[in-house]
Image (cartoon, grey):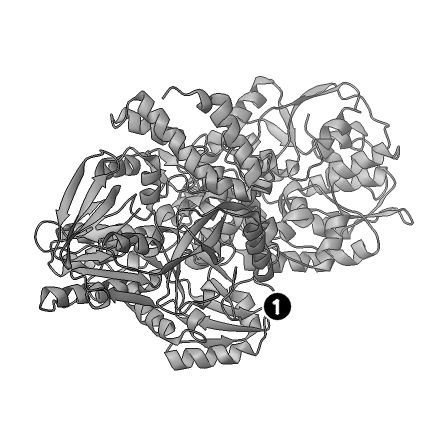
């Protein structure tokens, strides 16, 4: 079950984090309920492309317009989460070069800045890209760090008085006559159950929105489109490189922090919690990557993961999930089903998350009587106040000048001991996986092989967990991490996995740890 | 090619073997170590300039790459990162100067007595340290006054013999022309005609000081001089291990030069001792060695290990009756070309060399052998023990220092006091 953001004591709203943040900024007393950790759902699992709109310019013009508008806003308000990589659309030998004309025309019509550049210039900028490309176009794509975005929203929301309840499950929505008046929730960690009273409940549960809506006897038809992504060990490209053709599988390769990500696929799944990674899809992505960057299949793949897109279908059946619009949908259940105080916002994409929040909270304002203006297009997120765009070298630069005496716990991600300890205290968690999402602990080439037992030891040393607890959190982490590693194991990563395995099994004997 | 160096970081499993071998990070906290600054930091380097100035503290000795069991080109990654760093910031004047041995050589040679006085004068060196940044105590060779090139031009070798091309490098040309004459004498003793083409610097010092564009210019110029001989199928030998390695591998692997001429020269290039040992393997090396009843410690320079040829000098010198070579078990002398000359790195370089100095001194010998010129100068600086190229021992063992063969040895060489 799932996410919901709800309003607590007095007036309330609820929805996903961004809605919570928006509502809090407008002065509403806001509470967010999230069934697992923040960023554990769709946003935290997206590929990381801050769309320029180029991808949608031909077949989904309204999505393209939204993208370019939000792209411009987020570069300012979420600067710390955005890296200005630039984007490149290329016609590979497998793509019709004439599509480039449609592409340019679509970009022009939707206001997405696009410029054709000579192939030689494109190859100078991106030397690894297939030298057989026939056309190349520059667009203002950028890389968006989904986790930093989520934590930035969370901190902003909390600074404005919002309460965030991760690991809380919505058991039921309370309906009083024709009105939703609150939610019945349970803490997934402590087990206690309680009620939250809310004047407005916003259902922003993404691919799980249908399940939440049912609790209020409403119908929301959301299909879950599973997308697979693979992170490669280092940046094979420094710009977001897209195939210049109608959007399809495996046609985006973008730099995301120290890695680069190839994505995605789009497969309908009946249950958003059942996202099995299939070998066929891995192969498909690697093959498509090879078309963009020759030698891709020999490069080291670190990890594969899947996210589920919420694809809203109101009426007509759509055969292919790729053909569902990427624009969002706001559903006011008072006009749809006669249930007041309940809104669903779904569909959309991470690039337009802010716009979705604005729309949802605007609608909530309407229900509460009296519009409070939205400020999220102007007010920077926590961490982005200086408007300094993220750069890949930030963590490396922070270690200079050498010497620095402080030990590094996670070598791949350059996480220091104090950085780790501060995060543990601030987050008040004992889950290494939660810490991973905050700091990127164990996200590098060794996938935890050298850092994760150090981190477990620090948790224990700090008194956060006892011995059995430290063992358990280590085991939980390894189990979770392995899910994304085993589907891509070959070559260098296989060699790494063997070394890690010797450490975990041979030295630590993890299978027999007392828990 | 550039991407192949970077791509090798994919092979790193973080085993840390390189860190345990790095001679620099063992003696200073200013260099965070080869794993950190190599495959780890490289992932944080994007299209812009690197953010980590500490990469400049890598001495470029190359031991990390040699010991890596997974074939990560660690030293090469560092070298390229350093070049990008200086590309952005501009290579400092000091580094530009010490990276151009031909310029220094041409300036110093005509005024050798004065230049040598200045190079070894405490007050002048103090001034040079504060103005230019070359450490006042750093080992400096003396200008020979007459270059090897000018000596070679007047030398007439045996006619009609099979030819070998000699790439002598700048150290031999300006500072140690006698070593060059010994090389010629030993090769001629073995029946070769030695061709000494006009030649300049190979660009290695520029490469290790981060000026890749200038380094490429030097390599190309040198290749142009050597390639006609390579095309003619002649072997090219060098007594400078690092300059030879530059032509064999680094110009291609680090500077990224893709060039058929360079490839041809690379394939024709032999380290001097490697070449002589090949002769011996084919039964073509003269073994009319006299007894040399000496015990001499031998240090194989880091750059020579980069050749991947073992330690041919030891195999050759084992042929000399009564000569006992002691193989020293230390990786690096610390100098790393021009690294130890710099005022901020001199102390590091001496600390790296400390173990080697102790081992040399412990043998009690008043002579040491080493293939690389800058390493020899460093060993002598650190121990006071005279250090020679192995060719000097072969030269003596052949008795060439006592023999007069018309035209084969310059008078100066005959009278020179060859060490021992």
Q: Residues within 10 Å of mark 1 (few under 14, many from 20)?
A: few
Q: Nearer the viewer, residue B241 or B396?
A: B241
In the displayed structure, B316 sits above or below B118; it is: above
Residue B364 pos. (x, y %): 60, 17
Q: Secondary structure at mark 1?
A: loop
Q: Nearer the viewer, residue A287 or B340?
A: A287
Q: How many marks?
A: 1
**Quarter of the C terminus of chain A within the rendering:** top left
Q: Residue furthest front?
A: A177
Residue B115 pos. (x, y %): 53, 47
Q: In the figure, is residue A364 to the left or right of B119?
A: left
The residue located at (27%, 62%) in the rendering is A345
Residue B321: tell me if it is visible.
yes
Residue B254: tell me if it is visible.
no
In the displayed structure, B47 sits above or below B293; it is: below
Q: In the figure, is residue B334 to the left or right of A472?
A: right
Tag 1 subunit: A
The residue located at (57%, 55%) in the rendering is A284
Residue A372 pos. (x, y %): 12, 67
Pointer 1 residue: A94
In the displayed structure, A73 sits above or below A117; it is: above
Q: In the figure, is residue B87 to the left or right of A400?
A: right
The residue located at (70%, 41%) in the rendering is B239
Q: Nearer the viewer, residue B347 or A481?
A: A481
Residue B226 pos. (x, y %): 74, 55
Q: Residue furthest right?
A: B160
């Amino acid at each position: 079950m799932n996410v919901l953001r709800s309003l607590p004591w007095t007036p309330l709203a609820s929805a996903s984090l961004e809605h919570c943040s928006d509502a809090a900024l407008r002065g509403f007393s806001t509470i967010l309920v999230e069934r697992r950790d923040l960023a554990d759902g769709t946003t935290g699992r997206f590929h990381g492309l801050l769309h320029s709109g180029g991808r949608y310019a031909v077949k989904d013009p309204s999505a393209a317009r939204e993208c370019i508008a939000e792209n411009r806003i987020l570069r300012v308000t979420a600067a710390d989460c955005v890296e200005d990589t630039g984007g490149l659309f290329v016609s590979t030998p497998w793509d019709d070069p004439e599509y480039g004309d449609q592409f340019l025309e679509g970009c022009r019509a939707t206001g997405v800045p696009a410029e054709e550049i000579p192939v030689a210039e494109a190859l100078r900028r991106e030397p690894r890209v297939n030298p057989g490309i026939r056309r190349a176009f520059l667009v203002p794509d950028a890389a968006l760090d989904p986790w930093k975005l989520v934590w930035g929203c969370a901190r902003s929301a909390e600074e404005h008085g919002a309460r965030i309840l991760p690991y809380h499950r919505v058991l039921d929505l309370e309906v009083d006559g024709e009105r939703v008046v609150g939610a019945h929730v349970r803490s997934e960690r402590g087990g206690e159950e309680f009620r939250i009273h809310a004047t407005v409940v916003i259902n922003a549960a993404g691919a799980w929105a249908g399940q939440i809506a049912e609790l209020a006897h409403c119908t929301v038809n959301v299909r879950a489109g599973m997308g697979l992504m693979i992170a490669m060990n280092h940046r094979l490209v420094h710009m977001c490189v897209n195939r210049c053709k109608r959007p399809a599988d495996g046609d985006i390769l973008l730099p995301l922090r120290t890695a680069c990500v190839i994505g995605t696929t789009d497969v309908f799944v009946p249950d958003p919690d059942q996202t099995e990674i299939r070998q066929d899809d891995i192969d498909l992505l690697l093959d498509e990557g090879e078309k963009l960057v020759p030698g891709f299949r020999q490069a080291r793949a670190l990890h594969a993961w899947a996210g589920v897109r919420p694809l809203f279908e109101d009426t007509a059946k759509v055969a292919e999930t790729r053909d569902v619009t990427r624009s969002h949908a706001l559903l006011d259940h008072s006009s749809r089903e006669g249930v007041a105080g309940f809104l669903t916002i779904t569909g959309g994409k991470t690039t337009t998350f802010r716009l979705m929040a604005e729309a949802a909270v605007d609608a909530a304002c309407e229900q509460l009587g009296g519009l409070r203006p939205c400020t999220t297009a102007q007010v920077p997120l926590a961490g982005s106040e200086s408007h300094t765009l993220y750069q890949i070298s930030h963590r490396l630069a922070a270690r200079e000048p050498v010497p620095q005496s402080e030990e590094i716990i996670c070598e791949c991600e350059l996480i220091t001991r104090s950085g780790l300890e501060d995060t543990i205290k601030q987050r008040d968690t004992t889950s290494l996986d939660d810490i991973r999402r905050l700091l990127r602990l164990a996200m590098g080439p060794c996938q935890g092989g050298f850092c994760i037992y150090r981190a477990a030891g620090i948790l224990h040393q700090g008194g956060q967990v006892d011995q059995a607890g430290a063992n358990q959190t280590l085991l939980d982490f390894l189990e979770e991490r392995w899910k994304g590693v085993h589907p891509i194991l070959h070559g260098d990563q296989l060699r790494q996995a063997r070394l890690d395995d010797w450490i975990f099994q041979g030295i630590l004997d993890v299978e027999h740890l007392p828990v | 090619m550039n991407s192949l160096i970077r791509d090798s970081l994919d092979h790193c499993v973080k085993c840390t073997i390189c860190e345990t071998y790095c001679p620099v990070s063992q003696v200073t906290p200013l260099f965070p170590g080869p794993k950190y600054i190599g495959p780890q930091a490289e992932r944080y380097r994007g299209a812009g300039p690197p953010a980590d100035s500490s990469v400049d503290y890598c001495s470029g000795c190359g031991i990390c790459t040699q010991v890596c069991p997974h074939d990560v080109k660690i030293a090469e990654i560092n070298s390229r990162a350093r070049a990008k760093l200086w590309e952005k910031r501009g290579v400092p004047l000091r580094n530009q100067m010490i990276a151009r041995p031909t310029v220094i050589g041409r300036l110093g040679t005509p005024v050798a007595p004065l230049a040598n006085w200045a190079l070894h004068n405490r007050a002048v060196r103090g001034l040079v340290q504060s103005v230019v940044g070359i450490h006042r105590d750093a080992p400096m060779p003396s200008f020979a006054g007459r270059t090897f090139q000018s000596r070679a031009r007047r030398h007439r070798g045996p006619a009609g013999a099979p030819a070998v091309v000699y790439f002598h490098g700048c150290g031999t040309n300006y500072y140690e022309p006698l070593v060059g004459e010994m090389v010629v004498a030993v090769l001629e003793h073995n029946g070769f005609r030695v061709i000494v083409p006009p030649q300049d610097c190979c660009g290695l010092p520029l490469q290790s000081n981060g000026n890749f564009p200038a380094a490429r210019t030097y390599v190309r110029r040198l290749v142009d001089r050597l390639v006609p001989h390579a095309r003619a199928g002649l072997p090219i030998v060098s007594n400078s291990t690092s300059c030879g390695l530059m032509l064999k591998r680094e110009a291609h692997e680090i500077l990224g030069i893709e060039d058929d001429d360079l490839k041809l020269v690379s394939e024709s290039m032999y380290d001097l001792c490697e070449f002589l040992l090949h002769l011996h393997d084919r039964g073509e090396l003269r073994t009319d060695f006299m007894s040399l009843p000496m015990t001499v410690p031998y240090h194989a320079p880091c750059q020579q290990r980069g050749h991947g040829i073992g330690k041919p000098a030891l195999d050759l010198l084992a042929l000399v009756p009564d000569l006992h070579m002691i193989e020293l078990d230390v990786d690096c002398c610390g100098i790393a070309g021009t690294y130890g000359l710099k005022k901020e790195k001199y102390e590091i370089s001496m600390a790296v060399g400390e173990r080697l100095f102790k081992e040399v001194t412990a043998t009690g010998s008043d002579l040491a052998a080493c293939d690389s010129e800058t390493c020899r100068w460093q060993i002598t600086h650190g121990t006071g023990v005279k250090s020679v190229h192995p060719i000097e021992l072969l030269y003596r063992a052949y008795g060439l220092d006592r023999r007069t063969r018309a035209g084969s040895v310059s008078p100066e060489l005959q009278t020179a006091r060859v060490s021992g």
